[in-house]
Image: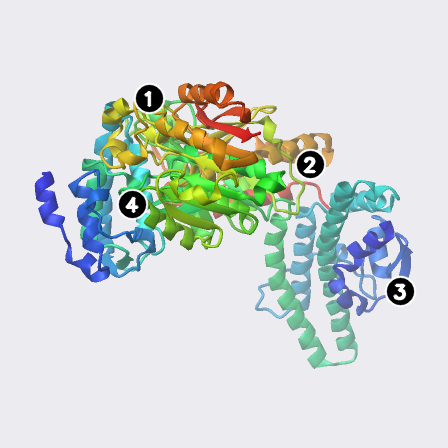
Amino acid sequence: MRVSFIIGYGVPKFSILLRPHGSCYLCRPMCSSSTSALTTSQKPRTSLFLRPPTHSATLSDLQKWQNWAKNLASSVGSTFVDLDNGPDSTLLRRELKWLVEDVTEDGSISAEQQRNIRLRVSLEELYKLWKQRIEERRPFQYIVGCEHWRDLVLCVEEGVLIPRPETEKLVDLVADVVSDNQGLREGLWADMGTGTGAIAIGIGMILRSYGRIIATDLSPLAVGVATFNVQRHGLQDVIEIRQGSWFEPLKDVEGKLAGIVSNPPYIPSDHISGLQAEVGRHEPKMALDGGVNGMNDLLHLCKGAASMLKPGGFLAFETNGEKQCKHLVEYMETNAGGIFCDVNLVPDFAGVHRFVTAFHK
Amino acid sequence: MVLASGYDALEGKNNGFSSISSLPMVKGSLEYNGVRVPFSLCRCFGTATAVEPSTSDGLTVQGIIANDWTILNESENDWKSHAAAIAQSIHLIKKRLQWKKLVVRLDMLSAELNKPDLWNDPVHGGKVSREHGSLMGKMKGVLAFEQELLEHIDMIKLAREENDAELEWESVKALLNMRRISKEKELEALLAGEQDPCSCYIEVQAGAGGTESMDWAAMVMQMYKMWAQQRGYRITVVDEMPGEIAGIKRATIKVDGEYAFGYAKAEVGVHRLVRISPFDSNRRRHTSFAAVAVIPILGDGSSRVRINESDLRIERFRAGGPGGQHANTTESAVRIVHIPTGVTATCQNERSQHQNKASAMAVLQCRLDQLEMARQAQMNAQHTKSLTDITWGSQIRSYVLHPYRMVKDLRTNYEVSDPDSVLEGDLDGFIMSYLSASLDKDDNP
């Protein structure tokens, strides 16, 4: 099934006409889950909603597709939920609605429209994309090439971690501390392992003309996507993207940072194989695997923060939950030589202790 | 300060006055609330029992109605017929606006505006001044219309005395025009409530009875979506809890557009369906219920309830598993609980948690506003009627698909024998008949 699928849809001619590097992205998601190695171009692919509506289909053909897709979604029932806590039919049908929103010009398919509806991808592609969603469990965000996060729409593609809803709160935590602290508001911030650039852009929206942010990532693919997202939000004067591992590209600002935020890989290595299919099969392990107990990168960041932050500086990290939070707090309070103060645990909206915040003395 | 603001409220909407002061009546001005205002205004607003506006020979709107002139078709160019039709409209409009209460309320507000310490509380001061201005505007509009009618009658009499056929023709034409406008004004007067121009949320909740009722709730929601679409309103689904097998447990939609609340408020209550159940293999007849609530979305000008962040509990909806990097989900719904009141709001149809939270907050704000309005209405005898408007209410309408076909409103007895058209959103007949029945039955003015 899967093989014939690739042959059938491997390199559709329309995408070559549309964009020179279209063929590259099309084969990537299907070949492997560790996709970054195959990438030659760092230019991100264009999210569906940003493409020009150069295709069209008749209303009845489109409705046929929509019904087919709905039925496919309904056939899932709670199979994925039972299997690995994946999406159920209700969620998939909602995603279908959003897919339609992204590929049509006025966001829906309705009988009042003209017989021919302009589309941002071909009908053939729509069939293919929805099949990928259901049969391969390809994440919806990779299908449409974007993730709505806070009040932003971020472009995302294979090889770059899809920002999680929980992580939105990291930005709120920063907004809270800068609201009554001018020193932090006008300082230099760092987002370590920025991925799509989500956290940096979220904070950038708050700091605007006051402060500046450096966002780093080891993956050249992530650097490409983050750069694109920063530009799309007009924040290139506020956010600088640097490629490299953790603090390596930040040597010139040692001891000068007003704040460090990060959502580093924190999943324990032995959990990786049992992850939900959307995550385990499609998202980059580099952005997920945090070593034996998942704490490798968090501890590395904590140690580094001690020397990178200036006095009074702030840090906020996302973790895997209560166990890691407590571990980090214990480290900061006892092993970090009394450098940190006001160490705090913050829960996410599901009540999981998700974040650790602290100040540099 | 007090005087200045009082003056603003009077002068701010003074455009309508140029026509009144040109009328053939005693002109002048008096001291009122410490400022000079045209005499006519004092006469109408200063004391509720003042002399009614009249023609030069003493004919009033009430007088015209009492004359019982025959009302002919618009095409008959008979000035008495036009005048009688307009006078009846004015009477109806005043009734719909609850004129007597309006006069009492305006007197109260005027007295309030006169208090020297009014602006010690700027929020309260602003509220009083705003309401005063808005009532004033409403009343002035009707009075100007009334004066215009009497002026044209004077003109016709004058024209007849002087055998000026052209002037008479002009005036009759003007009356005909007024007669047409008066029909629109009657409709406008149906929606004269303070919150009527607002957008709103419509909520539908399935009654007891499982799948059967959930399916009915979905049908009701679909009916409102189609109704709103036909009226040109923009609809957004805010919250939707699907039933296990079919339909919805509950859903909330936002209806954006002018007078959405004014119309939709007529739909509050329990809607009953009788049909052969498609879910019953024995094809028995079933009765299902769905409750409808309508919440106005107050504009920025209104005073809204202040919500303390610390009074809120925000929860991830349908949370489970370790979350974070472990999970890829497009589900980011949140539920916000306002702890002191227990009022909750949920949004799950936005694409980010941040947006879901913002939408849920907007719903919560409106629910709390409505609760506060109900609390104030309880204290303010004038508005007790609105209290019933906000609860889920009692049964208002019956939709029978079997053994006969009919939709009947239990409040007005308005009925339609084609349930399909109603379920496809053709609700205006029900809404209008309810609005006029609820306003016209009062002994006003």
Nearer to us of marks 1 and 4 is 1
Q: Position of residue B136 (x, y in %)?
A: 75, 53
The image quarter containing residue B150 is bottom right
Q: Chain of mark 4?
A: A
Q: In the drawing, what numbered circle is on residue A157?
A: 4
The residue type indicated by label 1 comes to Asn
Are the residues tagged 4 and 2 within 8 Å (C-beta)? no
Report the residue marked by disc 3. B28
Report the residue marked by disc 1. A293
Q: CA distance from mark 4 to mark 2?
A: 57 Å
Are the residues tagged 4 and 3 within 8 Å (C-beta)? no
Report the residue marked by disc 2. B383
Q: Is residue A202 left or right of residue A272?
A: right
Of B64 and A281, the residue lying toward us: A281
Q: Residue at x 67, y 30 (%)?
A: B375
The residue type indicated by label 4 comes to Glu
The residue type indicated by label 3 comes to Gly
Mark nearer the N terminus (2 vs 3): 3
Mark nearer the N terminus (1 vs 4): 4
Q: Is residue A124 left or right of residue A196?
A: left
Q: CA distance from mark 2 to mark 3?
A: 36 Å
